[in-house]
Image (spheres, coloured by chain):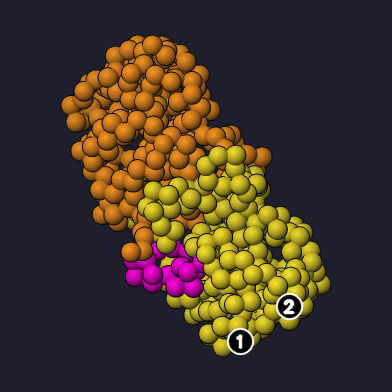
Chain colours: A orange, B yellow
Amino acid sequence: MRIAVLGTGIVGQTLGARLAELHHQVVMGTRSPAATLARDEHGRYGTPPFNAWLSQHPRVELASYAEAARFGELVINATSGAGSLNALQSAGASNLADKILIDVANPLEAAPSGPPALFVANTDSLAEQIQRAFPYTKVVKTLNTVTARLMVNPRLVAGGEHTIFVSGNDAEAKKSVCEWLEAWFGWKHILDLGDITTARGVEMYMALWLRLAGALGTGVLNIHVVKGS
Amino acid sequence: MRIAVLGTGIVGQTLGARLAELHHQVVMGTRSPAATLARDEHGRYGTPPFNAWLSQHPRVELASYAEAARFGELVINATSGAGSLNALQSAGASNLADKILIDVANPLEAAPSGPPALFVANTDSLAEQIQRAFPYTKVVKTLNTVTARLMVNPRLVAGGEHTIFVSGNDAEAKKSVCEWLEAWFGWKHILDLGDITTARGVEMYMALWLRLAGALGTGVLNIHVVKGS
């Protein structure tokens, strides 16, 4: 499949590498490919500069947001939450129309103290903002509740016995995404929460996730949903 | 132990009944005992009127918020989130001073559409509001992430293999609460998230919980936290 991964940070890199490994055609999208390639500082989490990563992944290509989105049959939003709407506007509504957009971003911003806070919550969500801005795109929220390594390899934790969520308005699109989550990454427990407004739940869960990571001393964590009979 | 349970709804009833069964001395607190006893309509979830419940639990007593709080060595806030600060003001700072207050309330209010929304979130929480209002009380947030029946009987789901959280500023108070959660209710997996600001995480999780309950068709559910090695 031709897949556009928008965003060249650790999330985009991790998804791009796994999808290329699965022999998909992956184009990563960024605001300015020249600027992204020229950057030589390490990432926030000690990740190497993008150009070093790209040279180790020769089957992945880098392009502008618009070129990547035009290329992709499937588009993944792996940009930072604060930059997502701008990045998607750059990608262009016509390049996103009629396509599935997997949104893995979280609407986090630095807080005056403590862990990051959400810049949209409660009666709206980033996924809904994106869906409203791109009404002809099938937005499916998923994977935002786990760290990048776990997105593509749930077996890293508890043998994969934990839950990932999908939210979206288009039932067929969600069905495809569920199949891909299982086939590409090995997710065993996928829970369809409902329409795109249910993304509020998974985005607000980040407030708990950040505290869980603090208490457990690792971001390689997830939750398994269990219910009574 | 002498325990005050503030709030006579389904949460207060469930906690009060279990604690009385364990031979604690339980006094339930309400705004006006006479009005609570005079009420004859069923509760929102089909629960019987409080007077009918009380007649089935003869070892439980009913009193005003202030009388109950004065009586209790331990106080549990099981009022609705929207009414919690007022109820605790009625209980009186001096009756709550130096005591552990277990806060199980959620700051939910009706939303224009869809499930309830949070009236405080993100950079503050109900538990923090309570702790600021009652600085001499040891507020421990816990149990708010599960439905009443599950609070007192985690084995209802997955053999009890799921997680409950505690948040609070006083380490000794949290230690006591953890011991009680295990001894009284049978909780096996208790995770200390940190200081009272971590209550933001468990309160904001309600946004996900409400959608989980919708998707699963039951509120008898919980999450089990798993992590990588």
Q: Does the magenta stretch include residue B117?
A: no
What is the quadrant of residue A35 in the picture?
top left
Q: Do labels 2 and 1 share a chain?
A: yes
Q: Please, what is the three-letter code of the amino acid marked with disc 1?
A: Pro
- Image coords of residue B6 (percent x, y): 67, 70
Tell which of B49 and B59 is nearer to you.
B49
Name the quarter where the C terminus of chain B is drawn: bottom left
- Image coords of residue A140 (percent x, y): 37, 32
**Mark 2, chain letter?**
B
Residue name at image x 39 percent, y 54 percent: B217
- Image coords of residue A63 (percent x, y): 35, 13
Kindly report the distance in space between the C-alpha atoms of the residues bearing marks 2 and 1.
14 Å
| Mark 2 nearby-residue class (10 Å; few <14, some 14–19, many ≥20) | many
Q: Is residue B32 above or below residue A138?
A: below
Tell which of B150 and B109 is nearer to you.
B109
Query: Which residue is denoted by mark 2 in the rendering?
Result: B63
- Image coords of residue B153 (percent x, y): 44, 73
| Mark 1 nearby-residue class (10 Å; few <14, some 14–19, many ≥20) | few
Residue name at image x 45 percent, y 47 percent: B211
Mark 2: secondary structure: strand
Tell which of A201 and A113 is nearer to you.
A201
Q: Please, what is the three-letter code of the amino acid marked with disc 2?
A: Ala
Residue name at image x 33 percent, y 25 percent: A100
- Numbered badge on residue B58: 1
Q: In this picture, which residue range is highlighted in magenta?
A: B148-167
**Mark 1, chain letter?**
B
Q: Which of marks 2 and 1 is nearer the N terminus?
A: 1
